[in-house]
Image (spheres, rainbow, N blue to C red):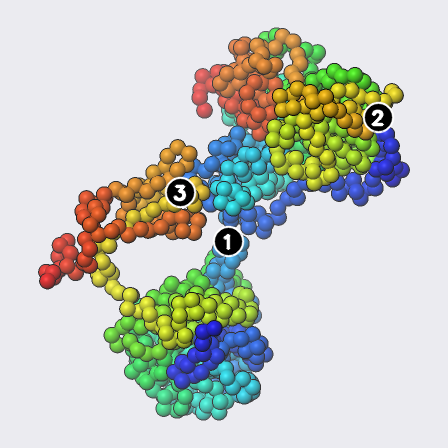
Amino acid sequence: MADLTSDFVGIKSPNPFWLASAPPTDKEYNVRRAFEAGWGGVVWKTLGSEGPPVVNVNGPRYGAIYGADRRLLGLNNIELITDRDLYTNLEEIKRVKADYPDRAIVVSIMVPCEEAAWKAILPLVEDTGADGIELNFGCPHGMSERGMGAAVGQVPEYIEMVTRWCKQYYSKPVIVKLTPNITDIRKPAAAAKAGGADAVSLINTINSITSVNLDTMSPEPSIDGQGSHGGYCGPAVKPIAMSMVSEIARGEETRGIPISGIGGITTWRDAAEFITLGCGNVQVCTAAMTYGFKIVQEMISGLSDWMDEKGHTSVADFQGAAVPNVTDWQYLNLNYVAKAKINQDLCISCGRCFAACEDTSHQAISMSEGRVFEVIDGECVACNLCVNVCPVEDCITMEAMAPGTVDPRTGNVVEPDYANWTTHPNNPSATAAE
Amino acid sequence: MTHSPLTPGLAAGRLDDVEYAENFSDLHPALDAHEALVAADRCYFCHDAPCITACPTDIDIPLFIRQIATGTPDAAAKTILSQNIMGGMCARVCPTETLCEEACVREKAEGKPVLIGQLQRYATDHLQDKGVHPFTRAAATGKRVAVVGAGPAGLACAHRLAMLGHEVVVMDARPKPGGLNEYGIAAYKTPEGFAQAEVDWLLGIGGISLQHDTALGRDVTLEGLKGDYDAVFLGMGLGGVNALAIDGGDKDGVRDAVDFIADLRQTSDLTTLPVGRDVVVIGGGMTAVDAAVQAKLLGALNVTLAYRRGRDRMNASVFEQDLAASKGVRIMTHVVPRAMHGNGAVREIEFEYVNPDMSGTGQTVRVAADQVLRAIGQLLVGEGLPDLAQGKIAVTGAGRTSVDGIWAGGDCASGGDDLTVTAVAEGRDAAMDIHESLTGAAV
């Protein structure tokens, strides 16, 4: 079995699967259950300043988007940071850490954007023996209205400033959690780096309204007929999160900063994908909230089996392996030509590829007697829509054309050499090919 | 319970009340809302879907399933009913495994089709349970049409004609409308008075009057109808049964399966219905299976279905054959009845084993039988009918007979399978043709 042990900015855990700062990590009871189930670490639900804790709404906190059979695809929430007393949390953290020294416990913190507030809480957290802190600059609802959470995360200068304070008043690793509710994720990441952060974690949740009740005209989740944008998470946000992770992993200013990946990770495969895009570990929330803590067993066995199959002995072996392949559109090889191919043995003749191509694409699939569907190579631009809508795995594939053959659509010979838009004759600002 | 399955001869009350209730409850219980959503989510919304092609009434199945999936079952029902006004009954009795569900691409992919029949029932029940009739009549045309037979063909024809603005009179020889839906289909396929409820709902369109106990040839004549109405549609089904001319074939305890089923459908108390201890049903069609299964469910100890060819040639679908087998009906094949034995009442039936070409093998077998049900096919009865073809009213196009102004459809007309859904399609299409012929307007 592959070695799954993880060392993320000096924080060790038996596997790279941490629970993200959220309801599952709000108290000792849950965290002990998580550790018993096998989670490598937790980021304790965000602590606020000493004093009367925040209050939550007393109606629904969550809204959901479903796929077939009520499979939960996306979840949003309007819950705030922990609504339990600061000292209760600190005592529990200390106790759990003492009992589970091999597991990672990172404490999420959100206090007002004032040096005194950070200076006050950091020693208290340091005293728990926790392995590090995560700065919650991402929470998009409620706390942001009070100048915290995403309100800080959306201003790079604040991120840098607060990160500096934390590095000054706290001795262990500082992870800055980023909000995706921003135009360019590289800016806050660079600010965190400039402030001395040991790592960034992303993404926090996305501003969202999951649905509108058409009888009451209230957004969901509805509190007495009204709703507020909540933070969206779950499988639906994974593509957005992975893109943001990859931008940081390959950005000029941000490259090299350790990343803890978050966003819709549901299976070992999702986790592996985040790691290939540069993450040192991953954090999970919605999947655990949907299925319970036991899913970590599948994540551990799945990642381990895949690593064995690929000959990876540690997570570091494949960390960032896909980063060099993330590029700008302008550098994609325009000489690469593919055609869709339908495997007639697998085809069940549903005709969805035909409807999609005929109605909305390039009229490149023919339908003939007996419901036989075939690709017309002379029309196929290899858009992949047929592959995407086909309900049968591997029935339609994209096959690369061999160099030297003629693309019947363009009449051009497929060139063996790489060539991209920057040198393309149609590009007004093309630079001459050397 | 005065008797048990072991009581010899014909006897009623072989079971207790709970057993009767269980045996004759819904064969396929209705899907609940969640089950319907799960089932609907499996539909791929195929292009030019093969299930539509397989449906004799061309229901837009992917559309109605999508309407269910998006929470609008009443819209789904309208999609169904606009093509098939008896969509509720067809959802219950159609051999979907040889029609839409056989054509479903998920049958091809996984051997598990989308539950089209049950989804159709979910939608139609949802609308009909509200008592809503979703169609309205066009402006009156002043034309009057006589429909003979209040079965699926006649009612479908009448409804479409009424919708198009014609006045329709539907006559039926029986005291209740519904035809085979009311008298001829196994009780467990349409429990709780659904057949009558559907007719009542269908008549909600208005413009249709029913004349029961009115038989063609006895109470009215085709000539008379032709004179009194602007058009006539014949949908009276097959009123007669094929005879079984063998030694002892007239002994007590021998009767037609259709009568056995009709009695069962019309009784208000199943415990009063006598059934044999050893029942033999002769035939291989849906009627034979319906009779055999229900004999078993009434408490017969042994029920044998005897068919002259192999199972692959039976008109009853594989699903029906399996249903019979699962209820404990024994299926004998390649046997032809040669004689019935017994002193007054039948005690045994003697079969000869036959070759695939129907030639005798000389080997015989006797099977205990205190009740024998004949289900060897039905036939058209009546005189002065339009020209016949293979014993049925010859039709061309949308039910046109050899006589101008007379249309026919359903089991009494040539062509098409003898299925409820086929009868509905033929009645509907004849109505469209009648409308065009009466008004000159194609719809």
Hey, what amino acid is under mark 2? Arg
Hey, what amino acid is under mark 1? Ala
Residue at 15% from the left image edge and 53% from the top image edge: A426
Q: Which residue is the site of mark 3? A: A344
Q: Is residue B343 left or right of residue A251?
A: right
Q: Which residue is the site of mark 1? A: A68
Depth-wise, is mark 1 or mark 2 nearer the camera? 2
- Does B276 appear above or below B147? below
Residue B153 occupies quadrant: top right
Q: CA distance from mark 1 to mark 2?
A: 58 Å
Q: Is residue B290 left or right of residue B404?
A: right
Q: Are marks 1 and 2 in contact (CB under 8 Å)?
A: no
Percent across and percent down for residue B347 are 84, 26
Secondary structure beneath disc 2? loop
Q: Residues within 10 Å of mark 1 (few under 14, many from 20)?
A: some
Q: Are marks 2 and 3 on the same chain?
A: no
Q: CA distance from mark 2 to mark 3?
A: 59 Å
| Chain ID at mark 1 | A
Secondary structure beneath disc 3? loop
Quadrant assignment for the N terminus of chain B = top right
Percent across and percent down for residue B120 are 57, 39
Residue at 37% from the left image edge and 40% from the top image edge: A373
Residue at 32% from the left image edge and 78% from the top image edge: A257
Q: Which residue is the site of mark 2? A: B347
Percent across and percent down for residue B168 are 59, 20
> Which of the two residues, A114 or A298, is positioned nearer the viewer here?
A298
Secondary structure beneath disc 1? helix
Q: Is residue B31 left or right of residue B19?
A: left
Hey, what amino acid is under mark 3? Gln
| Chain ID at mark 3 | A
Depth-wise, is mark 1 or mark 3 nearer the camera? 3
